[in-house]
């Protein structure tokens, strides 16, 4: 496939695809680095990360998507995850 065929088929350049993949990976690292904070402040909520920052959160997915739309953020460009704290095991000291 030529570069021109790729651009016509995908709608963006290979460099733009690479940049979007790097941005998405950076947002994933941000989510991982801030997971404990999000679990404490937004347990059992959906979160949206864009450009390595939290841009929206909501207890339900529809609310999160509405907030992204309100902010003019492309849903496809945001990393969306659910902060599920139900599987967190707490180890407490015994006396």
Image (cartoon, helix red, strand yellow):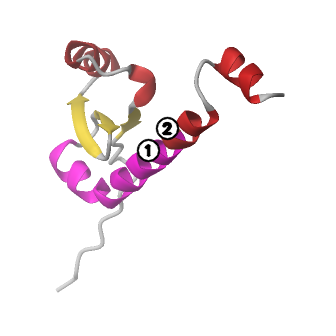
| Secondary element at image label 1 | helix
Q: Position of residue 43 (x, y in %)?
A: 24, 43
Check disc 2 and report the residue beneath it: 20
> What's the mark number on residue 48?
none
Residues in magenta, as a range: 21-42
Outermost bottom residue? 95
Q: How many marks?
A: 2
Foreground of the two, 59 or 65: 65
- Secondary structure mostly taken by the magenta-highlighted segment of the chain: helix
What quarter of the picture does the C terminus occupy?
Answer: bottom left
Q: Position of residue 89 (x, y in %)?
A: 35, 62
Foreground of the two, 47 or 11: 11
Q: Position of residue 60 (x, y in %)?
A: 29, 22
**Side (left or right) of 6 relative to 38:** right
Relative to 76, residue 70 above or below = above
Q: Residue at x 57, y 35 (%)?
A: 17
Foreground of the two, 63 or 16: 16
Few, some or many residues within 10 Å of mark 1 (<14, 14–19, 20+): some
What quarter of the picture does the N terminus occupy?
Answer: top right
Check disc 1 and report the residue beneath it: 23
Separation (CA) of disc 1 from disc 2: 5 Å
Q: Are marks 1 and 2 in contact (CB under 8 Å)?
A: yes
Q: Residue at x 30, y 35 (%)?
A: 47
**Side (left or right) of 84 relative to 63:** right
Residue 25 magenta-highlighted: yes
Few, some or many residues within 10 Å of mark 2 (<14, 14–19, 20+): some
Q: Position of residue 94 (x, y in %)?
A: 22, 82
Q: Quadrant of residue 93?
A: bottom left
Q: Residue at x 66, y 22 (%)?
A: 7
Q: Residue at x 32, y 14 (%)?
A: 62
């Amino acid at each position: 496939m030529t570069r021109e065929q790729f651009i016509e088929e995908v709608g963006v350049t290979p460099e733009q695809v690479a940049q979007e993949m790097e941005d998405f990976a950076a947002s994933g690292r941000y989510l991982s680095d801030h997971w404990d904070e999000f679990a404490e402040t937004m347990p059992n909520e959906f979160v949206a990360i864009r450009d390595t920052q939290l841009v929206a959160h909501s207890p339900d997915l529809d609310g999160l998507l509405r907030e992204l739309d309100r902010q003019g953020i492309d849903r496809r460009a945001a990393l969306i995850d659910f902060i599920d704290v139900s599987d967190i095991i707490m180890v407490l000291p015994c006396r």
